[in-house]
Amino acid sequence: MTSEGWGTPPVEPIGQHYIVCGGNALAHRLVLELVEHYEVPVVVLVPDRTRDHAPRIEQLDGVAAVVEYASVTEEALRAVRIETARGIALVDGSDQENIHAALSAQGHNPNIRIVLRMFNQRLGSNIERLLRNGTALSGSATAAPAFADAALSRPNSVQVGDRFLHIAYDDDIAADRICVVADRIDRQDLGRIRLLPDQEGDSASFVRLAGEFGDGGPIRSATEARRAAEPAPAPDEPSPAAGGVAALQTLPSEPAVRIPWWRRLRWRLLDTLRFFTSARLRVVLITALAAVLFSFGLLWYLNGDFAWTFYASLLDLAGAAQPDQPGAGDGSGTGGTWQRIAQVVITFCGITFAPVATAIMVEVLASGRRGQHRSPGAGTRDHVVVVGLGNVGTRVVAQLHGLGVPVVGLESDPQARGISAVRALGVPVVVDDGPLAEQLRRARLKHSRAVVAVSGDDATNLEAALEARAVRPDVRVVLRLFDDSFASHVYATLDNVASRSTSYLSAPAFAAALMGREVLGTLSVFRHVLLIAELPAEIGTGLIGLNRHDLEDPGGVRVLAVRLARSPRLYHWNYADRTRTLEPGDSVVVATTRSGLARLNTTLTENT
């Protein structure tokens, strides 16, 4: 690695280029987005050419130069020609380092577009006020909902106005769908998927089906539609392979997590008890409470008077019991042997509660128990095990915890930054660098509902999946995998598994932000991504004067809704008038592929 202040020589004179600072997976995906879809010159500033994703970045076609500097210093910015660049993306390093680099870049080039990755979103929103033309995004916050929703087997959604957009597949597609977003879906070969298929060729069959069955008619795959429209093949001809279909739908509210209220109450009570007491104290408390309840029931059975039994039991607990008290109704006393035994048990249990309560207070207030991580106890059931408490893992834990789903964190590095954040939420954490199988056992995998493996290493995540399946073959598994080919093999081999890539989910949003476009969210179609963006028709945006046909004509774009200037709060879904041109103050919501948004960006740039 180069030392501070030293690096490769400056790049050849270049202008109107984009700078990507970082050598991690997000930087790799972002460079791919820029050179493949936006077709712009890119200069990459990496901390070390030999580590992380830097060697693969150097091999990408379209990269103008790769410059090596240990950090984003003033000299490094001059080396990548910051003064003539159109934009810079800071996607590596800490929040503080990215803020410092962003302000330095703005000092060299006041008009440059700046996009910086910030884990602290609140701080990022405040930093945006200091930047003339910049935005702060969180890659982990963009990707975390997709991991959390996959763990709960519910659709990932993006909020637009008062509705939530989500992807539905095959039989789950309802009649009120907005548009078909994918066809040729084959879970054994994810490379066959087509996103936002054109209305020509195979997809024209959808139009014919709509005319045949009406608005409420069924949606079929392109292959099934072709079969309905064409003659049946001869007996000796092979039939084409079937393919699934995905469609975009809206919901009035975000899909709820179906957890019975009594389970939520039980989890809260158990969590509270485990927070304030250790395992030994819980055994003492539960044993004493059970003895008191049993003795109370015995007294009530022998005397038949609940009020008197309750009163006498309270006196016994307080140590103020009087033997042979008169009976409640017939004048008989309490001199029976069993009643005396019950009173003695209640009295001794009452004496036990005082020192136990004192021990609890000392443990909470004096020993700093709030600063210690908790291991999952016997009451931890139907939970989600999150393996890896980095940026993404911490976000996933927070997302699930906010939904009321019990979570257990698992981390092998005791210095991981996410442990303290998860601990602050009161979530149990297993911190151990031993065998992964033992860690999963301590996380009570046998009683869990899903395992989410989101460490930064694909091999570790796959190991977690295989270890989990060895213990529970039916457990839901969600993996964070960078390599697409690797993920395809996992889909083809394992059942009840979902794979997501943090960089794949967040890189399109960073690229769009670098081009000045705002992305509301991303929706996953297996390993593929759809972007939901809202484009305002303002002076200088290139949208004014365009109609729906103009926007969708380049391909890879669907207009979902239109907001008119005269009613800015109302979304007109599936706006029927394809010839009306956009006026100042209007805005459109589009679903687009990565390449579709790049082509749309080029069209709008040419119109400005």
Image (tube, rainbow, N blue to C red):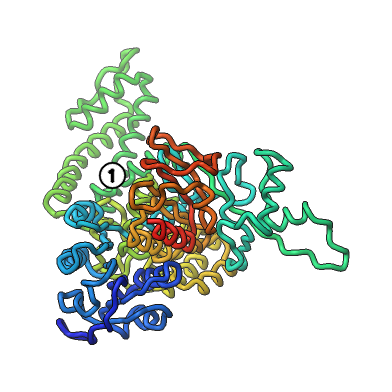
Could you tell me which residue is drawn at 25 percent across and 79 percent down?
47
Residue 318 position (above or below residue 8): above
Of 335 and 545, nearer the camera is 545
Image-based side of 285 in relation to 206, left or right: left
Could you tell me which residue is drawn at 16 percent across and 55 percent down?
130
Of 163 and 76, nearer the camera is 76
- Residue 226 lies, in percent from the top left, at 74, 56
**The quadrant where residue 482 appears:** bottom left
Residue labelled with disc 1: 272
**The quadrant where residue 231 appears:** bottom right
Residue 430 position (above or below residue 270): below
- Residue 342 lies, in percent from the top left, at 31, 33
Could you tell me which residue is drawn at 45 percent across and 55 percent down?
531
Please state which amino acid type lies under the numbered disc 1.
Answer: Thr
- Residue 159 lies, in percent from the top left, at 41, 44
Q: Quadrant of the N terminus?
A: bottom left
Image-based side of 311 in relation to 223, left or right: left
Residue 162 position (above or below residue 599): above
Residue 423 visible here: yes
Image-based side of 57 in relation to 355, left or right: right
Residue 380 visible here: no
The count of marks equals 1
